[in-house]
Amino acid sequence: MWDEYHTFLAVAETLNFSRAAERLGQNTSSVSRAMSRLEEHLCKRLIDRAPSIRMTDAGDRLYTEIAPLFDGLLEAEKAIRSDDGKVRGRIRVVGPQEVVRWVINPAIVRILNEKHQVNFEVEATSRVPNPLEDPVDVYISHRREEVTNKSLIARRICAIPQGLFASPKLIGRRVLPKTPTDLAQWPCLGRLGEPEWELIDEKGRKHVVPVRGAVFSTPSETRVELALLGIGIAQINLHHGNEAVKMGDLVRILPGYTLHNMYLHAFLLSRRLIPQAVQIFMRYATEEARKYFPE
């Protein structure tokens, strides 16, 4: 029943007999007959055909069980055929612009410099992809709470400590804030959907501060640029903020208070074995991130 199971995977992933047939190099009637044979063999209906194709509960369960097995067989076949130590494949990666620049791109460079035969598609965006409409192998972001699709699982890459920073242009001759409540008198730059900051003092007490300012933005590079121009106080990761302090471009605000860490995650498809190319990319991306934020 190998051919029937292979056909079932194509139908389950396309939800269309014609597209499944095109993928398999067959005609539509052959695909339909193969599905009927498999359903008769299992004594279960795997798909509902009308008014449009959709998976039954049994079909969903079968796909979940066998898709990783077929992925593993394909990976093993590739490894046996190419016994030269080189990894092959195609990876589609999505992430915010700053993550593309300091995590994704360096990982890609390492893979290509090692002469692996991997092709990459990279999208720099602040949106959260939908893996059902826009197939993505790896999505890297700190926005875990916005990833609600159960087809994606999260793998933590690193923690990103945060601090508050402002430009000397904004500070001028003003007295720096001494307590979180003093921030109410200052323009602040927040993330979209972030109405407040939570600061923790040396005794572990929490101080919730409303973010008041003219600009709320994603990605973070926008807030950093505006902070450098003196538009407001921004929450910036400590590595880049402290580098700007050394250059005299920024000043740390309320250094005696800590903010909650952000966490960078990689989101992967949960139903599939992780191809070797993706495994190597993940390892290198994690190593690149931890050059800035060691754990």
Image: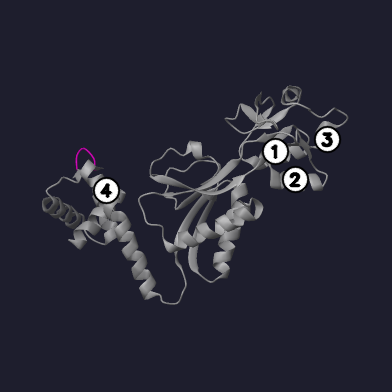
Instruction: Find residue 204 and report its image quarter.
Output: top right
Residue 23 horizontal/vertical position (percent) = 30, 58
Mark before the other along the chain sequence, 4 or 1: 4
Residue 262 horizontal/vertical position (percent) = 59, 41
Mark before the other along the chain sequence, 1 or 2: 1
Q: Assign the magenta stretch its main secondary structure.
A: loop
The three-letter amino acid code for the residue at tag 1 is Gly
Q: Is residue 82 left or right of residue 9?
A: right
Q: Report if the CB atoms under discs 4 and 1 are less than 8 Å apart.
A: no
SS under mark 1 = strand
- Residue 242, label in figure: 2
Mark before the other along the chain sequence, 3 or 4: 4
- Residue 163, label in figure: 1
Can you tell which of label 3 and label 4 is closer to the viewer?
3
The three-letter amino acid code for the residue at tag 4 is Asn
The three-letter amino acid code for the residue at tag 3 is Lys
The three-letter amino acid code for the residue at tag 2 is Asn
Residue drawn at x 83%, y 32% as measured from the top left: 171
Residue 274 horizontal/vertical position (percent) = 41, 57
Can you tell which of label 1 and label 3 is closer to the viewer?
1
Residue numbers of the magenta segment: 49-53
Tell me the CA gap for discs 2 and 3.
17 Å
Instruction: Find residue 68 and report its image quarter.
Output: bottom left
Mark before the other along the chain sequence, 4 or 2: 4
Q: Which residue is mark 3?
A: 169
Tell me the CA gap for discs 1 and 3.
18 Å
Q: Of all residues shown, which one is farthest toward the front?
A: 203
Residue drawn at x 57%, y 43% as measured from the top left: 263
In this orientation, does residue 146 appear?
yes
